[in-house]
């Protein structure tokens, strides 16, 4: 598993920016993908989120091949809310960061999440 640590999700201008670190549960765990999810519901995550793409900022980073995890590395993801029509209504939106692990020889691997953050847009 991967823990998402030291998470900060803030809005600056038209961008929502997430900064965070990762921590592996074991030395053999690598990171396959990190994503910032956004939706109108507190259950935001991989299966309940807006379909964001590169034109909306950098909401996701995929590592191919999967990357070693260094706890000192700070990652940054961003969503440009002005570039996506999903954010066209003034209301509260929920954002959270998720990390997908990669570990050889392990069955089911799920996305691990940081707590959500509510931001009014």
Image (cartoon, grey):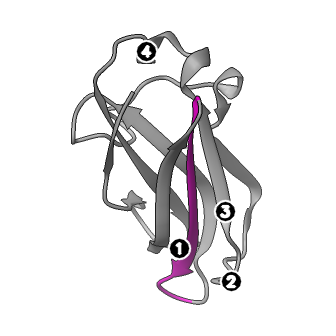
Q: Which of 92 and 48 lies nearest the eye of the viewer?
A: 92
Q: Secondary structure at mark 4?
A: helix
- Looking at the image, is mark 4 or mark 2 earlier in the sequence? 2
Q: Residue 83: percent from the left, percent from the top? A: 61, 16
Vertical placement of 11 versus 99: above or below? above
Q: Main secondary structure of the magenta part?
A: strand
Q: Quadrant of residue 37?
A: top left
Q: Which residues are magenta?
A: 14-26
- How busy is the neighbourhood of tag 4: few (under 14 within 10 Å), some, or many (20 plus)? some
Is residue 59 among the parts visible in the rendering?
A: no
Which mark, by number, is residue 86? 4
- Element on which disc 3 rests: strand
How would you rate the neighbour count of disc 3 (Cα within 10 Å): few for under 14, some for 14-19, many for 20 or more?
few
Seen at 66% across and 77% down, the residue is 69
Query: In the displayed structure, does residue 119 sit left or right of residue 52?
Result: left
**Mark 1 or mark 4, which is nearer the start of the sequence?**
4
Measure the C-alpha gap from mark 4 to mark 3. 25 Å
Q: Which mark is residue 75?
A: 3
Please, which residue is most extreme toward the bottom here?
27
Label 1 – label 2 distance at C-alpha: 27 Å
Callout 1: SS: loop
Q: Secondary structure at mark 2?
A: loop
> Who is closer to the viewer here, 92 or 65?
92
Residue that carries the numbered disc 1 in the rendered image: 105
Q: Do callouts 1 and 2 mark residues in contact (Cβ within 8 Å)?
A: no
Residue 72, numbered label: 2
- Residue at 68% over, 83% down: 72
Measured from the top left, where is residue 56 in percent x and y?
Answer: 64, 25
């Amino acid at each position: 598993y991967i823990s998402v640590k030291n998470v900060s999700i803030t809005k600056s201008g038209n961008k929502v920016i997430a900064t965070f670190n990762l921590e592996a549960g074991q030395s053999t765990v690598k990171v396959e993908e990190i994503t910032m999810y956004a939706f109108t519901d507190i259950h935001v995550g991989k299966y309940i989120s807006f379909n964001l793409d590169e034109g909306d900022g950098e909401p996701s980073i995929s590592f191919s091949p999967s990357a070693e995890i260094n706890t000192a590395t700070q990652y940054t993801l961003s969503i440009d809310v002005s570039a996506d029509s999903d954010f066209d209504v003034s209301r509260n939106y929920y954002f959270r960061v998720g990390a997908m692990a990669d570990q050889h020889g392990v069955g089911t691997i799920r996305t691990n999440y940081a707590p959500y953050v509510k931001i009014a847009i």
